[in-house]
Amino acid sequence: MALPLLFELSSEGRRGFSLSCLDVPAKKMNQMIPEKFHRPAKPELPELSESEVMRHFVQLSTLNHHVDKGFYPLGSCTMKYNPKINETLARLDGFTAIHPFQEEDDVPGALQLMGELAEDLAKIAGMDAVTLQPAAGAHGEMTGIKVMRAYHEANGNPRKTIIMPDSAHGTNPASATISGYQTVQIKSTEDGLVDIEDLKAHLNEDVAGFMLTNPNTLGLFESQIFEITKLVHDVGALVYMDGANMNAIMGLVRPGDVGFDILHYNLHKTFSTPHGGGGPGSGPVGVKAHLAKYLPSPMIVQRNGKYALDDNREEAIGKISSFYGNFGVMVRAYVYIRMLGGKGIKKASSTAILNANYLMRILEKAFLLPNKQHAMHEFVLSGDWQLEKGVKTLDIAKRLLDYGFHAPTVYFPLIVHEAMMIEPTETETKETLDAFADAMLKIAREVEENPEILHEAPVTTPVSRLDEGLAARKLNVKYVPDAE
């Protein structure tokens, strides 16, 4: 189903809005705006009625798959349903009508919300201080690594390398590299956990830190975490936790209690704020007390019983984001945490773990499960059995669309061949999980009986299978009207 573009629907002179009279004289306004910002001509925008615009975007929304429409088992990304109470409160005028340049005395409520959110996040993770500035998880990683570097520089040596396991998220080496470090990769054991002996072999006084996701990208909790953090600390290095998978442990395990010095949170994953399409996001960073002075400025502090911004921080790494971070995302996360409370947060993690293991034990009958132990919030299957029949994991992912489900993460982590990484989250019902499992089992039967249908999938979607490689290499999103 191909929808016309707004430019193609445009009709000259049609309007979908009515603006009030300009209350600033045009001549004065032109004087206020520097001439270099004046347009030489009116912008070429489509001209449509309000109903045309509304119907166009509603139709587009029905073509897309999204969390409000259906199950989204995207492993490592925690695509959970976003409660609408979060959206309602984030849209209050008191939050949407303020500006970061306002005086602190004008926005005490916003400062209190951010201050209390930082305190809540610190309690959940067992950290002593939290910055809310980073705009996304990877941005939080970079911030955490820069804090790590500032700490080592203050001790006389920035050190040279950062260690990470072969199951690490791709952003981990990127964040380390952009912060001036070399990365060292260590292998995983057959059980999918950190190889302690390989870690020992690479630890020395050149190591600045060890980056670890826990649970890891196989959905497994690092059972030797106390030994790992002690080994790293013994050489004077710091332990960084990638918080992408914190949805499995919030309320159950506090990273700060098991030896982590730094971690980033993903408010757009764990704390139920919108996720996908490149934003919005938020990646706060929490640290233990000995690193707090290096967090970026400004920090939210309490003065005389009120929350305020503290810019007077000589050892801070500087400012890493405009203003104080993505405030609208923070409001949603704050509401989510306060609505759940401590017991609710624990129950959310426990339910996520239950849902993942329920699905895993059903699907292991038809797909290869490389790691047999119980998982946390997600698990990784392999499509190797299907590949023997000529069907790739990509074919399985595309066929799922015909059954009305978004595909899980595929081909990651790299240490599992033909990987399918599945995370159901705590917000899905047993009926939804059963329907997804039934679709996966039907696809497994199709591989045996009619594999050609998988090679052609999807066949029920508005757009059939695309050449994704070509689209990535020759991206073209500019509209050029047909010549008349």
Image (cartoon, rainbow, N blue to C red):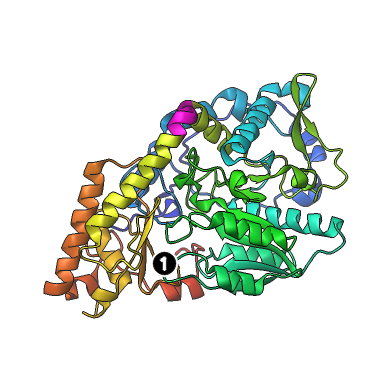
Residue 401 lies in quadrant: bottom left
Answer above or below: position of 113 versus 283.
above
Q: Position of residue 458 (x, y in %)?
A: 25, 65
Q: Is residue 223 visible?
A: yes
Labels in figure, total = 1
Q: Residue furthest left?
A: 449
| 88 left or right, relative to 232 | left
Where disc 1 sits, the SS reads loop
- Image point (47%, 51%), residue name: 276
Q: Tag 1: residue type? A: Asp
Between residues 195 and 129, which one lies in front from this camera angle? 195
Q: Position of residue 77 (x, y in %)?
A: 46, 53
- Image point (71%, 22%), residue name: 108
The C terminus: image quadrant: bottom left
| 270 left or right, relative to 393 | right
Check if residue 407 falls in the magenta segment. Answer: no
Q: Position of residue 376 (x, y in %)?
A: 40, 51
Check if residue 343 falls in the magenta segment. Answer: yes
Between residues 228 and 427, which one lies in front from this camera angle? 228
Task: Give the main secondary structure of the magenta stretch.
Answer: helix
- The magenta segment: 339-345
Between residues 98 and 210, which one lies in front from this camera angle? 210
Q: Which residue is mark 1?
A: 191
Answer above or below: position of 86 versus 139.
above
Q: Is residue 81 visible?
A: no
| 388 left or right, relative to 424 | left
Q: Residues within 10 Å of mark 1 (few under 14, many from 20)?
A: few
| 401 left or right, relative to 329 | left
Answer above or below: position of 426 versus 186.
above
Between residues 71 and 469, which one lies in front from this camera angle? 71
Q: Position of residue 425 (x, y in %)?
A: 38, 46
The N terminus: image quadrant: bottom left
